[in-house]
Amino acid sequence: MEPSAKRSEELRSHQWYGAPGLRSFSHRARTRQLGYLPEEHLGKPVIAVLNTWSDINPCHVHLRDRAQAVKRGVWQAGGFPLEFPVATLSETFQKPTPMLYRNLLAMETEELLRSYPVDGAVLLGGCDKSTPALLMGAASVDLPAVFVPAGPMLPGHWRKEVLGSGTDMWKYWDDHRAGLIGDCQLAELESGLARSPGHCMTMGTASTLTAAAEALGMTMPGASSIPAVDSGHDRMAAAAGLRIVGLVREDLKPSQILTRDAFEDAVTTVLGLGGSTNAVIHLIALAGRCGVRLTLDDFDRIARTVPVLANVRPGGGPYLMEDFHFAGGLPGFLSRIPDLLHLERPTVAHTTLREQLDGALVHDDDVIRTREKPLSAEGGVAVLRGNLCPDGAVIKHITADPELLVHTGPAVVFDDYRTLQRTINDPALGITADSVLVLRGSGPKGGPGMPEYGMLPLPDHLLKQGVRDMVRISDARMSGTSYGTCVLHIAPESHVGGPLALVRTGDPITLDVPARSLRLDVPDGELERRRAAWTPPPERYERGYGALYQEQITQADTGCDFAFLARPGQVPDPYAG
Ligand code: FES
Ligand code: MG
């Protein structure tokens, strides 16, 4: 299908630059002030290059250069690129959690694109929440957009070990606490873990979400796994710049790409990669912006049909994203599961998914497994239900100790993370390997922002005995690079009176992953008595953005969007009023 090209007078930016009247005169005069000749820009599609680069964000520190490659492509295709700095969400540095700011970046993205003379956008990001935030904003404003994933950093090295972001940091930190490695080794690890720009190179949240963006059809083919410092990454950025101009002329918008079929394929991708549990929240939120009702039940249904084929830490192992890239990347992976995908969908690359997968190959069957030799017969995330989580909870069961997938044990309850950190080693708590560690007060509203506390630390005395996993449950999230038998995203959260608020130390809790169930074994009458005595905790923020967040945030099972952003409705065109 060759759509008829949009003429220059039909471009959105024409209202700013080409329409008769004083305002256009002023905009043209001010563009000359920027140093551009009229013939350099008039009548050309204006492309916003939204850049999440910052000195504080090691995952995006190369994006200032990549924006230049994007602009090169835009100029060559006859567009007019303008770079917009937008908020940077650094998973490493931003406290209490960048999740508090995902919706803020989504709002910034949407409103910048709406309020300026923009015809299309190239979105640069990749560190965890940046990807969903940029896509949520672009989807809401519904202007043609291409996403440029930041790319994974190079693999870490220490002595003879290859190190994975996050995953190996947790592992060696526990070894240090257990007395297995000393301060010197720890100092060496500090230098070896992260050795180049780029996002985490495990199949953490960043790699999972950029892969989802590619599967949705919002990136150039094969873009998501290109290492950040590979010159192929520059070429991909230039290709995105070249392509966005055509997308604007064709008027191919996110609403035509981000369909229900696209979201089902993104869920299939995330589950088959053994990807991060955070993807559940972000994809539900993004789908909501597109008018697609994606639910936890969709994840559970699709999980039962998708094998895990990516042998990448922490879901599989031992490989990292660079290995995945050279084994064929996402096109290679998707070429193993064409029967599970909707192949006739459009993508930003002007090809259908089927055309993109034509000729895609896997070059290493150990990194991207065959269907006959999956890492797990079912997808990497399971959705749990039961009286402790009436609106659902999730567990990345492929990283759990198989012995713990069916387990009953007495609860040891912590009301918040600070108390947990202070008291976890207190012998008076009587924690054994059979205990079920329970953390509450860490959900969307109570956290607020669902900090990644979900991989609760184990007590020192158990680490020293060699214990490396226990059943842990919370209304928090967990880093995509974390692992263990951690039940997450319990909904409703304790802060709003979910049953998690009623658990007491000593209550028996039963986890049964094969049955998809999480139960608090306390009689209903007793739970009702406890509920009658329960009072809601105070809000943590009395003013400012945090207070707005607490007021507007929705629960984990519906994606943690702001209620006023998630609802459908008209937004006036800035030139209409
Ligand atoms: Fe940025 Fe992990 S810290 S992706
Ligand atoms: Mg992370």
Image (spheres, helix red, strand yellow):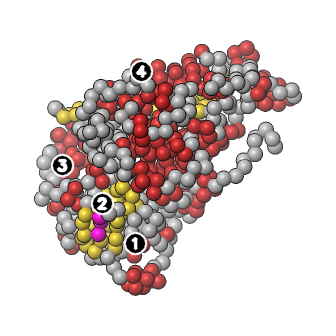
Give the labeled residue for mark 1: 387
Image point (56%, 18%), residue name: 72
Which amino acid does the dot numbered 1 rest on?
Asn
Which amino acid does the dot numbered 2 rest on?
Pro
214 w.r.t. 431: above or below: above
Give the labeled residue for mark 4: 232
Residues packed near mark 1 inside 10 Å, few (<14), some (14 to 19) or many (20 plus): some
Left or right, 297 with reference to 317: right
Give the labeled residue for mark 2: 514
Q: Position of residue 577 (x, y in %)?
A: 81, 43
Q: Earlier in the sequence, mark 4 or mark 2?
A: 4
Image point (76%, 40%), residue name: 574
Give the labeled residue for mark 3: 176
Which amino acid does the dot numbered 3 rest on?
His
Q: Secondary structure at mark 1?
A: loop
**CA gap, disc 3 and disc 2:** 34 Å
Work out whether residue 89 can be spotted: no
Tag 3–tag 4 contact (CB < 8 Å): no
**CA gap, disc 3 and disc 4:** 38 Å
In terms of depth relative to the viewer, which is nearer, 273 or 459? 273
Q: Position of residue 90 (x, y in %)?
A: 44, 42
